[in-house]
Image: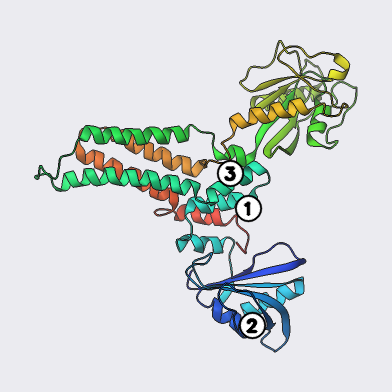
Amino acid sequence: MTTDTIFALSSGALPAAIAIVRVSGPMAEQAVTVLAGSLPEPRRAGVRRLTAADGALIDEALVLHFPAPNTATGEPLVELHLHGGRAVVARCLAELGGIPGLREAEPGEFTRRAMLNGRLDLTQAEGLADLLSAETEWQRRAAVESAGGGLRRQIEVWRERLVILSARAEAAIDYVDDEDETSLDLEALIAEAGALRMEWQDWLAQPPSELLHNGLTVVLAGPPNSGKSSLFNALVGSDKAIVTPIAGTTRDVLEAAIDLDGIPLILRDTAGLHDTDDAVEQIGVERAQQALASADILLWLGDPNDPPAGDNVLKVHSRADERGAAPDETIPTSVPVPNGTDALRNAIVANAMTLLPPPDRASLNRRQRALIGEAVDRLTTGTHDDLVIVAECLRGALTALDRLTGHRGAEDVLDTLFGKFCLGK
């Protein structure tokens, strides 16, 4: 694949003020020279008139030239900064496609080449994918940490420790007849491996990154006419739920994604919990109970002395402007009053921060957790008095770490990962 030269529009939707077309591969410099006549000095922008094969002027563009290997992809790379009209970009792409040896890039192919050429590893590529999809400040900060190599650096530390342990074990096996070379304290080696295993277990005990990517589920629950829908609308910032004084207005689960102080949340409004003979209301109550069971944070607007069981239940005293002082351990809210929901918002944010991975520390996704779990299992079985078995377990743990960064066995995830990227990335 990397023998091809690829091109794609790498900027946003057209029309736009500027459109950036990226060309990468062994023929990138030659291909752009065909259009532009010449290239500017490396890493210095130059204005060039881009001319089609028939002599027609395509556009007057800014050209940037990046020689290999110090480029985003590790290959020769050229960028064309065009005027962002659809016709301009279409003609430029058509002319590039007409040059032998060039083809349009596949989704994520620029980033994939960067990984294959050693410009970033698999954990950084996953972080970059998260950065492209980030919608809140916490998601952005976490993705920047991963894309910037936070997890990769930690894995390198682990790998170095594991390589040293493995080398000591292998040396003792290779020089089994030489006591000077085999002065190995197997018990101490197993203890060091155990310390590394415990460190991995601590990482596995941290909240998974999926909680941050998908958002925490916050469910509003309580009896009919307890103010759930009014509060739901206030938190969402629009009249998404119908609000009436008639009991049972909400009969289904309403859902909205919100950003609260940079934290991604999925807010759910539910039907009032009560006994009813109405078949439709019964369905609504059943769905409300299901929503309660799936809540990461529950906002309970019912009797504060009889809340549902759970670790993250916030007892809300709704309509505080009408009902008076809030009972102990409840959070007063009043939708019509300015700043009347501030205390609840602050409480939700404080609670969510205890459930989410810290945004400034690398967290593990499902794939990464599985591989670290595999490494833990390997070292667990390595607590053996047979040096050969211990050495094999260390090798197995090292293989799992290498798969984490993509140094080994990464092909099974590359297509899925890079298929999520846009064409120009």
Q: Is residue 287 left or right of residue 406?
A: right
In this rendering, which labeled residue sits more in front, label 1 or label 3? Answer: 3
Residue 227 visible in the shown view: yes
Quadrant including the C terminus:
bottom right
Residue 84 higher or lower than 210, as above or below: below
Q: Residue at x 70, y 14 (%)?
A: 329
Q: How crowded is mark 1: few (under 14 residues within 10 Å), some or many (20 or more)?
A: some
| Circle on res. 57 | none
Q: Say which mark, if any, is on residue 132.
A: 1
Would you name the residue on which mark 3 appears?
142
Label 2: element kind: helix
Judge the density around disc 3: few (<14), some (14-19), many (≥20) Cα neighbours within 10 Å.
many
**Residue 296 in view (yes/no):** no
Secondary structure under the numbered disc 3 in the rendered image: helix
Residue 47, how many percent across, how many down?
68, 79
- Find residue 333 and report its horizontal and vertical position in percent: 80, 23
- Residue 33, image x and y in percent? 59, 83
Q: Which amino acid does label 2 sit on?
A: Ala
